[in-house]
Amino acid sequence: MTDSAGGQRPGRDTRPFSGYHNRPTPNDDSFITSVGPGTPGGEYLRRYWHPFLLSSELKDLPVAVRLLGEDLVVFRDGSGRIGLLHRHCVHRGTSLEYGIIAERGIRCCYHGWHFDVDGTILETPAEPPTSRIKQHFCQGAYKVHEWRGLLFAYMGPVDEEPAFPHYDCVDHPGDNAPVPFRMNLPCNWVQIVENGCDPIHNAYLHAIVAGEQFSATFKVLPELDFPRTPLGFLSMATRKVGDHVFIRASDIVLPNFGQFPNGANMANRESLGLRPYLSRWAVAVDDHHSFYIGLAHLNSYNNPSGAMQAQDFGVDQIPFIGQTGDRPRAERQREPGDYDAVVTQGKIANRKAEHLGTTDRGVVLFRRMLAQAIRDVQDGKQPEVPRVRDCGPVRTYASEIVVRVPEGLLDERSALADFGRQAALAFVETDGLLGAEREAATQERVQALLHSLSAPAQSGQQP
Ligand code: FES
Ligand SMILES: [Fe+2]
């Protein structure tokens, strides 16, 4: 196999010790990985609301943040309004991280220019009273929305701002308030999303190879599937464990939102987990730095014993091994986790040097959808955004379903995959409903699926 220049493609020379002939070619996927202003990927990302800070991180002083390659400052003024401004003062560039917060807005420390949270210049005190300078400029500012303990920014064109997507995952009556967290990673945001599109790594990284990090159930190799949803697709794994089928479906929502079921459950009793454990966004600081930020749902389904506490979550803190780089190197080598797997792909993973297999279908699907969405924005189209409906919040689709199946059924891989897909899609197809009604309708559909499995077997036993 040769490349367009007539050379051997890396990895195709299968002679022993042929590293010389198999060195990786340079990366070339900035189309999907770039995040800065004016780049293809960056313009696309600027059509969405992105969470960037925990509310609890914003205290009485301005906070310098970097988001989508832009240096910004965020503060809460004396009247409780939140400002997200370009960090450097429009007068002569001093950082507003050293600005003095006012009852209304913030005042630059250097010459006292006073900015409102929307960037309006309220005062230029060193200028003569007749000066009209403040009418001719403003400080760059972005809109902020505070939701469930997270601050979200919209950094796109003013007239293309989408409505803020209130997701249904926070609306389960009786649940504790979701718990915010934020985890920093020194790599590009796309590979963090790809990790969620890759359910086979749960079997290897989190069970078989690197130690039992999820429950023992994850050692069983699953059937994978990636059916589409109105928001993106499901990243699915279906396992037969003894006489139970364990169906785990994560939500992948473009560009950077994902929801993941609990990893601690065993496939040893029937359950219908129609709610995520984590709702999470992979947000770009710049091309080479990102964080995932989101909400943990510590409800009776995900946390039945109450072992996980709100204080287990925070900045660079989550109660799951291998999510930070602060463990001793040797410990990370002995039991690596997601952080080690994802960050060591490189600041920007070299996709040109990859050799993808059949289990990478979800990753490929995500890249294709992402690239298409970026092209659409380049062509002047509005991208798909999660929409609040007339009849309530944005519906989401993460689920974890365990059912008992009669002996001898679903032993074939294709039948098992098909059953898993239909069961997970039952929760997608009922999205016209909400809450308990939707759960009941999903339950009914899953029971009907089970019945259709066992009915032919029973009728076969009739004389
Ligand atoms: S640099 Fe900010 S007021 Fe002069
Ligand atoms: Fe993982």
Image: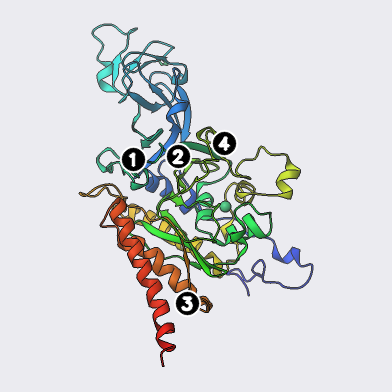
Position of residue 410 in the picture relative to residue 173 (left or right): right
| Residue plotted at (35% across, 28% down) | 140
**Rendered image: mark on residue 415:** 3
Dot in front, 1 or 4: 4
Q: Position of residue 456 (x, y in %)?
A: 40, 84
Q: Residue 243 is drawn in which quadrant? A: bottom right
Question: Looking at the image, is mark 2 or mark 3 earlier in the sequence?
Answer: 2
Is the Cβ of the residue at disc 3 closer than 8 Å to that at disc 1? no
Is the Cβ of the residue at disc 3 closer than 8 Å to that at disc 4? no
- Near-viewer residue (221 or 375): 221
Q: Amino acid at mark 4?
A: Gln
**Rendered image: mark on residue 68:** 2
Q: Amino acid at mark 2?
A: Leu
Position of residue 318 in the picture relative to residue 438 (left or right): right
Q: Position of residue 56 (x, y in %)?
A: 45, 27
Viewport quadrant of the N terminus: bottom right
Q: Which residue is mark 1?
A: 156
Question: Looking at the image, is mark 1 or mark 2 earlier in the sequence?
Answer: 2
In the image, residue 332 sits, relative to residue 366, either above or below, namely above
Viewport quadrant of the C terminus: bottom left
Dot in front, 3 or 1: 3
> Around disc 4, counting alpha carbons within 10 Å, would you say few (fewer than 14), some (14 to 19), or many (20 or more)?
some
In the image, residue 410 sits, relative to residue 99, either above or below, namely below
What distance separates the C-alpha of mark 1 from that of mark 2? 11 Å
Mark 1 element type: loop
Q: Amino acid at mark 1?
A: Gly
**Rendered image: mark on residue 317:** 4
| Residue plotted at (30% across, 18% down) | 121
> Around disc 3, counting alpha carbons within 10 Å, would you say few (fewer than 14), some (14 to 19), or many (20 or more)?
few
Q: Amino acid at mark 3?
A: Ala
